[in-house]
Image (cartoon, rainbow, N blue to C red):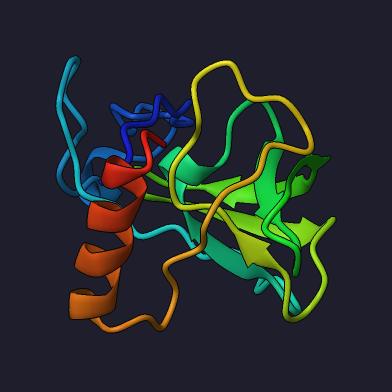
Amino acid sequence: MVYLIVDVIDPYQLQLSRSQRTDILKFGTFVTANVAAKPIDNAIKLQRHMVRNDHVVLVDSNGLTQMRKVVIARTDLDHAYISAGLDEGELVSRTWPDNHLDGTKVTPILNIPSSSVAQAHSKATENGE
C-alpha cells in the first residue's frame, strides 16, 4: 500500500447542479484508489533494501564486490524496479555490507546446498576468517 495526497477537483461537487450530485468527498476522507501506471520494459525487480542511494552491490565471478549506480524507475514499499544499470546474469548482493569497499572478497552462497554452506562457515571459523 502506498499513501498519496491528491488534489481532487470539485470534491464537494459544487460545480454540478443538485440533481447531478452523488456522494461528496468530505474533508479528511481516506479513499481506496487504483492508479494505472505504464509498464516498464525490461525492468528488474529487486527487494528495496538491496538498493541504497541509487546503488547496488554486485559480486563478480571472482567473488569481488563492486558498487554500481542504477536507474530506479519506480519503488513501492517492498521493491525497487531497476530500468538501467544492470546486465543479465550479474549477481546483486542481497545484503548491504557495512563500510563497503569495492574489491572486497566475498563467498557467494547462491545455489550451494545448505550443508555445504554450514561446512564453509565452519571451515572459515576454524581458519579465523
Q: Is residue 13 above or below residue 116?
A: above
Residue at the location (28% across, 42% down)?
125
Q: Nearer the viewer, residue 71 or 107?
A: 107
Res 4 → quadrant: top left
Give x and y (percent) for residue 70.
79, 46
Residue at the location (68% across, 70% down)?
43
Q: Is residue 119 above or below residue 77?
A: below
Quarter of the figure that contains the C terminus: top left
Give x and y (percent) for residue 71.
79, 47
Give x and y (percent) for residue 76.
42, 47
Q: Nearer the viewer, residue 43 or 113?
A: 113
Res 54 → quadrant: top right
Q: Is residue 85 above or below residue 51?
A: below
The residue at the far front in this view is: 127
Q: Is residue 61 above or below residue 27?
A: below
Give the mark count: 0
Residue at the location (59% across, 30% down)?
52
Give x and y (percent) for residue 64.
72, 50
Task: Give the left or right position of residue 124, taking residue 64 as reference.
Answer: left
Residue at the location (63% across, 24% down)?
100
Task: Give the left or right position of residue 98, taking residue 101 as reference.
Answer: left
